[in-house]
Image: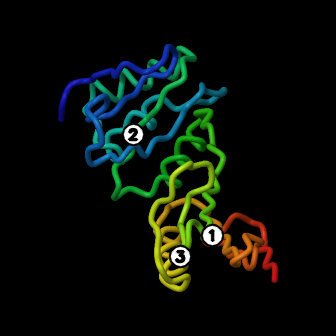
Amino acid sequence: MSTLSYSKAPKGRRERGPVAGRGRSSFARRKVRVRGWSVGFNKVATTNLLRSYCGYGLKQAKSTVDEILSGDPVEIYVPEHVDIEAVRSALGQLGATVVVPKRRRQTYHVAPEDGAWAVRAEGQSRAAQTFRRKADAVSHARHLAREKRVVSRLVIHDRTGAVQREHVYGDDGRAPTPQS
């Protein structure tokens, strides 16, 4: 393992992990945010957890635990092959105050644009791709919505631009709202 390294993150948000600050490596930016600790925090078990789940060395794991105890926010990077929810749960059971991020919801639109059908992510000014046939555009948008690791919504418009149908992919706790 490499030594502990910090990236140039904003003040109070240091990135930690074997590849912190080195771009998108095997960690692919999957992280658990720890804001502090509560009474009964188990320092030894947390050190062991960081070593076994996250691949930290002993020095790096101890340093991370000490930073958690100091009250500074810490971002712990988790490898792809490890269940991130298991790490969050285990840290919480050991007394760490884990910040659970809100699930982002990505929306894709299939709408007419200049005689073609455009697939556009909501909030983007440019279309991701354009197609001659609506069916091809819907197929591509459906693929984009399903491949993301977040809850995605697909909104299909008719020729006039009015919403024809909506589909939700992933589990966000809300039922899809089909419109005809």
Residue 10 x %, y %: 48, 18
Quadrant in the rendering for residue 45? top left
Q: Is mark 2 on a helix, strand or loop?
A: strand
Could you tell which of marks 3 and 2 lies nearer the N-terminus? 2
Residue shown at 78% from the left, 67% from the top: 174
Q: Is mark 1 on a helix, strand or loop?
A: strand
Residue visible at 54% across and 23% down? 73
The nearer-to-camera label among 3 and 2 is 3
Determine which of the numbered discs, if any, sits on residue 142 in the image. 3
- In whole angstroms, how far apart are the C-alphas of marks 1 and 3? 13 Å
- Tag 3: amino acid: Arg
Here the colouring is rainbow
Q: What residue type is labelled 2?
A: Tyr
Q: How crowded is mark 3: few (under 14 residues within 10 Å), some or many (20 or more)?
A: many
Residue toward you, 137 or 75? 137
**What is the distance, in whole Å, between disc 3 and disc 2 at their CAs?**
30 Å
Q: Mark 1 points at which residue?
A: 111
Three-letter code, disc 1: Ala
The numbered dot on residue 77 is 2
Secondary structure under tag 3 reads helix
Locate the N terminus and report the quarter of the image it occupies: top left
Question: Which quarter shows the C terminus?
Answer: bottom right
**Depicted 153 relative to depicted 41: above or below:** below
Describe residue 175's horizontal placement relative to residue 46 as left or right. right
Q: Position of residue 8 (x, y in %)?
A: 37, 18
Earlier along the polypeptide chain: callout 1 or callout 3?
Answer: 1
